[in-house]
Image (cartoon, rainbow, N blue to C red):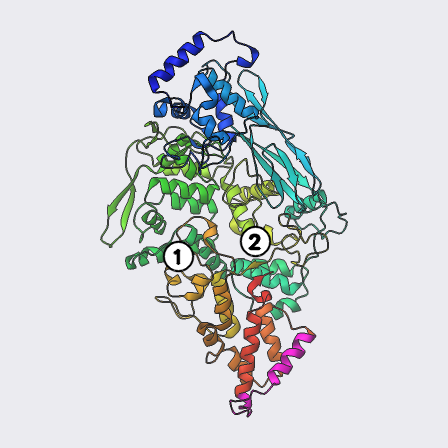
Amino acid sequence: MPTPCFQCFWLTLLMASFFAAPASAADKPISFVNDVSPVITKAGCNMGICHAKAGGGQRGFQLSLLGFEPRDDYESIVNEGKGRRLFPPEAARSLILRKASGDTPHGGGVRLQKDSESYRLLKRWIEQGAPWGSDSEPKLVAVEVQPSSDVIPMKGSKQLKAIAKYDDGSVRDVTSLALYESNTEAMVHATDGGLVEVQDIPGKIAVMVRYQGKVSVFTAAVPLGATVEKLPPAKNFVDKHSFANFKQIGIPPSDVCDDSTFLRRVTLDIAGRLPTVEETNAFLANTDADKRDQTIDALLRSPQYADYFASKWTPLLKNRRDVKSDITANFAFHAWIRDSLLANVPYDQIVRELLAATGTVVGNPPVAWYKRVKDPKEQLEDIAQLFLGVRMQCAQCHHHPFERWSQDDYYSFAAFFSQIGRKPTGIQGEDMIFHKRGVATARNVKTGVALRPAALGSDVGEISADDDPRLRLADWMSSKDNPFFAKALVNRYWKHFFKRGLIEPEDDIRDTNPPTNPELLAALEKHFIDSGFDLKSLIRVMVRSNTYQLSALSNKHNANDRQNYSHFYPRRLQAEVLLDAINDLTGATTSFANLPAGTRAIALPDNSYNKSSTFLQFFGRPNSQSVCECERVQSSSLAQRLHMINSNEIKTKLATSGGRAQTLASSKAPLEERITEIYLVAFSRKPRSEELTTAMDYIKEPILDAGGKPIAESTATQQNFQDLIWALMNTKEFLFNH
């Protein structure tokens, strides 16, 4: 049937409505906002991969993402294309229904079954003349999931109910129209109808329920059900809340790790290096009850602590060298971060110095951040994600799909950075940063409204033209009432020491992404604030806990645990740490341009050294392009294995003149002691009896030349020591912190 022209369409609609029969209950006026838009959203038509796709939707049909702009959607469906998508005289022949039901070829496939209530509702709406609705109709204020929490056994299920609440006090069951999304698919799946299906992994689960821009969260405990009787002593509040969670879930923890494992683990985690042989022997011989705490304090005082954590922060703060002239800013910024960490400058002060930086790089190194990050939108997005754990990127173009942040929130936050001035200096590529006098505003690109600075969900008051708005932002961020600042940092550091954040990803803090142990996260946040934002104090309380000191060896109950920290989760050594560890084990060094001889990889000031180091490239050292920790690659690859097994770099380090293999081969010490030294360096432990026997037999084994004759004993011994060191550095025990 030919599609009617625009004029005929509305004339037919008028006649149809004139001769229509009296309204029945089934003909109750349908609202586009309250009835039609939820159907379109549930069908997935306004997803980013369909008709809400950036750049014009699909085939000229553009909808707003997840229906956040219903007026625009109504115009697109009813009026655009000369009204060709709807045909009220014979609603079933409307293009929107023919495509959604599969009667007409549709790239998105069948989205609505003809016998479904959603199809019938859309059909009735078209028959009614596609009304917008009334300004007096109730407005949605919240969606509530019932129940909000529960306990579900493994392999069990739970049916959820979604209730929409309106401003007139009315409620509506929208279970069939709500969207359900699991936060951890490996643990729980949610069907389109709201049935929660739990897998066989114990822990805490969360399912986000979304309806018309409103969200709610269902949480549940999935217990293993084992009896938790034997627990290590609780050293602090970390253990108190962790152990309570073990009992609730019914998941017995592993035993506390031995001294060698602890020493290697904590030294790698705090100082980014292996313990020396002297440190290991002294620690193992120490009989003090608090020797682990003594070691933690010594590591936090060491310069390697500052080096290591500077290597964590500077990539996140984009300390990137794109051209040679960046070297002054790169070195100055890295030194500022490192010195601040070494002096234990309070975290809120470090952030304030960065946010409000003015002047030149030479006089005030934090200015270097503004050299790299110049766009106010990029500045706000980086600050929000890095220091608040809030991802604002989506809100630049539309309402955040999983959060309450709107475009107004986005540009109000950007206004804090709107009065930053730049003036060229005598140093090539360097600007002087200053505060421009004037009222700070940022214009919402959609509405055109100029917005004053406003923090996320908080009013910071009027800011005069003479005041730098960044200082007001810093005040708000470090306030004890700020719901993001301290939480984001403690969650980020928890992930550093425990592999997984209490909220995961670590920089995605929102109501719809709840923590696995909210009581523990709240206690860590309070401790951090009460300590005056003391970073070393935070680290100390984490690593002193027996939760941190649990063995990586699982027991028969907790092998599948991935989020409750019932055992230590092994993780690969970072690129810089692994390179330094290989140098320590082989007795070699790596030279870096413009740096003193002997500089360790964890002390590299910027990303430029990645280009000259195949090792750092292969093992995932970040290039400082993003504020996301995910830029640091921690997964394994074939290139990594081949490099460790057979690269010229590794061969050269093994055979280096004056290296460990050569030194041990020429040493007059008993062979057992020489082999033990290698194990102490690599694993911070002595070899087991079977390991020692195997190693001694191998070192004594002669090597034959091409003619079948034994080569010189000294040469053979050195080569055998190289082989032993090579074998140990390729073990998981060496490559992982465990």
* Quarter of the view holding residue 154: top right
- Tell me the quarter of the image containing the C terminus: bottom right
Q: Which residue is mark 1?
A: 335
Marks 1 and 2: which is nearer the front? Answer: 2
Give the mark nearest the N terminus, 1 or 2. 1
- Tell me the quarter of the image containing the N terminus: top left
Which residue: 45% across, 7% down?
Answer: 19
Asked whether the viewer can see residue 718, the reply is yes
Dot 2 amino acid type? Phe
Q: Position of residue 736 (x, y in %)?
A: 57, 62
| Span highlighted in magenta in the image | 690-714
Which residue: 44% across, 23% down?
Answer: 94
Viewer-closest of 140 and 73: 73
Which residue: 28% across, 35% down?
Answer: 437
Element marked by disc 2: helix
Q: How many marks?
A: 2
* Quarter of the view holding residue 470: top left
Q: Position of residue 3 (x, y in %)?
A: 38, 23
